Image (cartoon, rainbow, N blue to C red):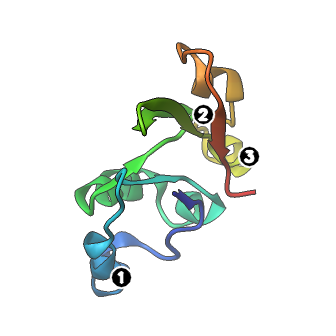
Amino acid sequence: MLTGDIVDGATVKREKDIAPLKNLKATYGVSGSAGNNEYYSGYDAWQKKLPELGIHMLNNSHIILSINQTPLVLAGITDPVAAQFRKPVPNVTEALEGTPPVRDGLSSGK
């Protein structure tokens, strides 16, 4: 789980720098949530680019992992700076909406 501030700078200026992120491997997949850097560096472009690199972004959303047949909710929220960019502000309720009653993990760049 990458907890915000994954990048710094515009996508076009960071193409070579971020290319190694495509090589990240994790048993349960690579997920991330937006930190303030993603907003200052072009949120919309990064939200398109990061999934292309195999990073599943969890911005006020969640995924349910099965670890040894036990469900684990992994949730991520946005950064408070989102309000300055007229983007969705952090919302834990939204991030956990529809989750089963299991132990939760919440990711925030703060």
> What amino acid type should be assigned to the residue bearing mark 1?
Lys
Q: Is residue 65 left or right of residue 4?
A: left
The image quarter containing residue 78 is top right
Check whether the beta carbons of the residues at disc 1 and disc 2 lie within 8 A of each other.
no
Density class for disc 3 (Cα within 10 Å; few <14, some 14-19, many ≥20) is some
Q: List the residue tagged with mark 1.
A: 13
Q: Earlier in the sequence, mark 2 or mark 3?
A: 3
Density class for disc 1 (Cα within 10 Å; few <14, some 14-19, many ≥20) is few
The answer to whether residue 90 is above or below residue 22 is above
Cα distance, mark 1 to mark 3? 25 Å
Q: Earlier in the sequence, mark 1 or mark 2?
A: 1
Helix, strand or loop at disc 3? helix
> What amino acid type should be assigned to the residue bearing mark 3?
Pro
The answer to whether residue 26 is above or below residue 78 is below
Q: List the residue tagged with mark 3.
A: 80
Residue 87 percent coordinates (x, y): 58, 38
Q: Residue at x 33, y 74 (%)?
A: 21
Residue 65 percent coordinates (x, y): 43, 36
Q: List the residue tagged with mark 2.
A: 88
Helix, strand or loop at disc 1? helix
The answer to whether residue 50 is above or below residue 83 is below
Q: Nearer the viewer, residue 88 or 65?
A: 65
The image quarter containing residue 106 is top right
Q: Nearer the viewer, residue 80 or 25?
A: 25
Q: Earlier in the sequence, mark 1 or mark 3?
A: 1
Check whether the beta carbons of the residues at disc 1 and disc 3 lie within 8 A of each other.
no
Cα distance, mark 1 to mark 2? 26 Å
> What amino acid type should be assigned to the residue bearing mark 2?
Pro
Cα distance, mark 2 to mark 3? 9 Å
